[in-house]
Image (spheres, helix red, strand yellow):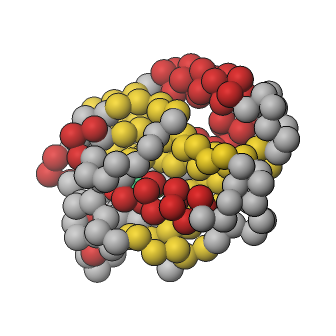
C-alpha cells in the first residue's frame, strides 16, 4: 500500500538515488510549537461541551502533528487513524482519492476533528469530510497543519489552520518526500532540482 499519498518520488522506480536536501526552512520548530498550543486551545474552547471528541489523524503525514496536538488538548478525546491514497503524477496534486484504511469506531452522534498534514489541491480533505459527514457525526471539523493557498482547487473547509505556506514541496514534521525527511523537527522546502 502506498500509505501516504502523492509523494513525488512514488511514481519513480523507488526513492531518489541521491539524498534530497532541504533548501529553506519554511516554519521553524519554535513556530510549530507555539501554533500547536494555540490550535489546541482554540479546539478545546470550541468543543468544551462536546461529550466525546474524536481526533481522526490522516496517515501517514499527520502522525507527528496529531501526537503533539492531542497532548496539548485539555478536553477529553480519543484518537483514530484513517489512511487514504491518491494517484498523482510527479509532484502534481492528487487526482482521485481512495480509502486505504478506515477508522475503527462509530462516529454517529459524536464530534469529529479531522487532523491532516497539508492541503494542496484540497481533494483529500474534501473527500474525507464527505466520507465522515455521511456517518452522521454530531459535528465535523478539520484541523490542517499547512495549506498551499495558491494550489487549492477544491473548496474544502478548514476550521483550524496552522500555516499558509508557499507553493513548494515541503518535508518534515510528518511530511515526506518519497518517505524521506518525515521526522525533521521543522517544515522545510526541498531544493527545486529535487522536486
Ligand atoms: P491534496 O489532496 O491535493 O490536497 O493533497 C494532499 C496530500 O498530498 C497531503 O495529505 C500530503 O500527503 C500530500 N502533499 C501535498 N503537498 C505536499 C508537500 O509539499 N509535502 C508532502 N506531502 C504533500
Ligand atoms: Mg496527507
Q: Position of residue 43 (x, y in %)?
A: 66, 30
* Residue at figure coordinates x 71%, y 38% from the top left: 70
Q: Is residue 176 in sight in this rendering?
A: no
* Residue at figure coordinates x 37%, y 59% from the top left: 123
Q: Nearer the viewer, residue 132 or 13?
A: 132
* Residue at figure coordinates x 58%, y 43% from the top left: 141
Q: Position of residue 81 (x, y in %)?
A: 66, 60
Give the vertical position of 5 relative to 48 (above or below). Answer: below
Q: Nearer the viewer, residue 22 or 109?
A: 109
Q: Residue furthest left?
A: 193
Give the vertical position of 29 relative to 150 (above or below). Answer: above
| Number of marks in the rendered image | 0
Q: Nearer the viewer, residue 187 or 162?
A: 162
Q: Position of residue 103 (x, y in %)?
A: 69, 66
User: For residue 107, what is the image quadrant?
Assistant: bottom right
User: For residue 14, what is the image quadrant?
Assistant: bottom left
Give the vertical position of 105 relative to 168 (above or below). Answer: below
In the picture, measured across the screen, residue 87 lies left or right of residue 180, that is: left
In the picture, measured across the screen, residue 139 lies left or right of residue 33, that is: right
Quarter containing the C terminus: bottom left
Q: Is residue 129 in sight in this rendering?
A: yes
* Residue at figure coordinates x 79%, y 38% from the top left: 50
Q: Position of residue 96 (x, y in %)?
A: 34, 71
Amino acid at each position: 500500500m502506498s500509505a501516504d499519498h502523492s509523494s513525488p518520488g512514488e511514481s519513480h522506480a523507488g526513492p531518489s538515488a541521491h539524498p534530497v536536501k532541504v533548501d529553506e526552512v519554511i516554519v521553524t520548530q519554535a513556530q510549530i510549537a507555539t501554533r500547536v498550543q494555540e490550535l489546541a486551545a482554540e479546539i478545546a474552547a470550541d468543543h468544551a461541551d462536546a461529550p466525546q471528541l474524536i481526533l481522526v489523524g490522516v496517515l501517514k503525514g499527520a502522525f507527528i502533528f496529531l501526537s503533539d496536538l492531542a497532548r496539548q488538548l485539555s478536553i477529553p478525546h480519543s484518537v483514530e487513524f484513517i489512511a487514504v491514497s491518491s494517484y498523482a503524477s510527479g509532484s502534481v496534486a492528487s487526482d482521485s482519492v481512495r480509502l486505504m484504511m478506515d477508522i475503527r469506531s462509530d462516529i454517529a452522534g459524536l464530534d469529529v476533528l479531522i487532523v491532516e498534514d497539508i492541503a494542496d489541491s484540497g481533494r483529500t480533505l474534501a473527500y474525507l469530510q464527505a466520507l465522515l459527514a455521511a456517518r452522521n457525526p454530531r459535528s465535523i471539523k478539520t484541523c490542517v497543519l499547512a495549506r498551499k493557498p495558491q494550489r487549492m482547487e477544491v473548496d474544502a473547509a478548514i476550521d483550524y489552520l496552522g500555516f499558509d505556506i508557499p507553493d513548494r514541496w515541503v518535508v518534515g514534521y510528518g511530511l515526506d518526500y518519497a518517505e524521506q525527511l518525515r521526522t525533521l523537527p521543522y517544515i522545510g522546502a526541498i531544493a527545486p532540482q529535487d522536486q
